[in-house]
Image: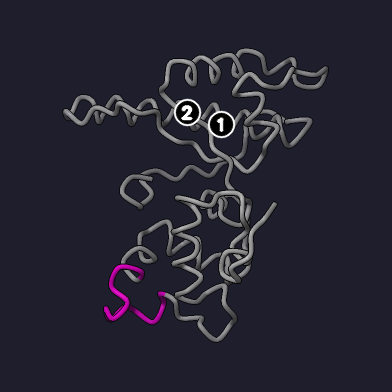
Amino acid sequence: MMNGAALKLVSKKQTLTAPSTCWAECVTLFDTSTHVLGLRNVMAELGQYQEDPTHIYCDNESAIQIANNRGSLGVTSRAMDLKTLSIRNRIKDHQVETAYVATDLQVADQGTKALPTNPFIRLRDTMNEYAIVKAAHPDKEMSDLIFGHEGHGKRGSQSMANAMIIMITQFKHQSVDELVAGTSAV
C-alpha cells in the first residue's frame, strides 16, 4: 500500500505445497518482498527514493522470527533455506522490514480467502482508501456501498474504521474489538 491505498494485489495458488502455515507465510513473505523491491526501484527511478525499509505486515509470528534470523530452521523448514536467506538479506540491507499485524487487521486477507460480509467490507474500504476518506471527512457524502452495513454491528461502523486505521499505525498487537472497546491486550 502507498498513501493508504493498495498498489498491487496478487492472489494465486502457490507453486509448491507447504507442509506448514509458517512455510507458506515465508514463501509469501519472499514473494511480497520481491514485489516490494520492484516497486522501490520504480520509485527510485522516479526520484522518490525510500530511505527507510518498507514494512511488510505478516500475521504469523514464526515466519517473522525466521525472517529476522531469530528462529532456527527445523527439519520441516530446512528446504526453504534459499528464500529464507534472501528475505534475511533484504532485511539486513534495510530494504524491507517485517511487522506483526493481528489476523483480523491483515488487509491482504481480502484477496486470499472468502470472508463474511463485515470483514470483507472493512478490509475493502481500508484497501481502497474509503476508510481514510470517511475518517478524515465524516460529513462527506459517500456511496451507500461504503459503510453501508451499519446495522450489522460495529464491524462495519465508522468507529470501527477509525479504530482500524489507528491500530494499524500504532497498536498492532491489539485486536480491533479490544481497541474499539478501549481495552488492551497483554
Mark 1 Cα-neighbour bin, 10 Å: few <14, some 14–19, many ≥20: many
Q: Secondary structure at mark 2?
A: helix
* Residue shown at the point (61%, 28%) measured from the top left: 27
Q: Identify the residue under disc 2.
A: 33
| In this picture, residue 22 sits left or right of residue 181 | right
Q: Which residues are magenta?
A: 135-146
x and y, in percent, of residue 66 in the image: 66, 24
Above or below: residue 61 compared with residue 180: above
| In this picture, residue 82 sits left or right of residue 136 | right
Marker disc for residue 29: 1
Residue type at mark 2: give it.
Ser
Quadrant of residue 142 in the image? bottom left
x and y, in percent, of residue 42 in the image: 26, 28
Query: How far apart, in angstroms, are the residues tagged by discs 1 and 2?
Result: 6 Å
| In this picture, residue 133 sits left or right of residue 94 | left
Q: Secondary structure at mark 1?
A: helix
**Along the line of sight, the residue nearer the viewer: 24 or 53:** 53
Quadrant for the N terminus in the image: top left
Above or below: residue 178 compared with residue 66: below
Residue found farthest to the right: 75
* Residue shown at the point (54%, 65%) measured from the top left: 120
* Residue shown at the point (58%, 33%) measured from the top left: 28
Residue type at mark 1: give it.
Leu
Mark 2 Cα-neighbour bin, 10 Å: few <14, some 14–19, many ≥20: many
Residue 113 inside the magenta-drawn segment: no
Numbered disc total? 2
x and y, in percent, of residue 86 in the image: 54, 16
For the residues labelled 1 and 2, say whether their Cβ atoms are less than 8 Å apart.
Answer: yes
x and y, in percent, of residue 31 in the image: 52, 29
Residue found farthest to the bottom: 151
Main SS of residues in magenta: loop
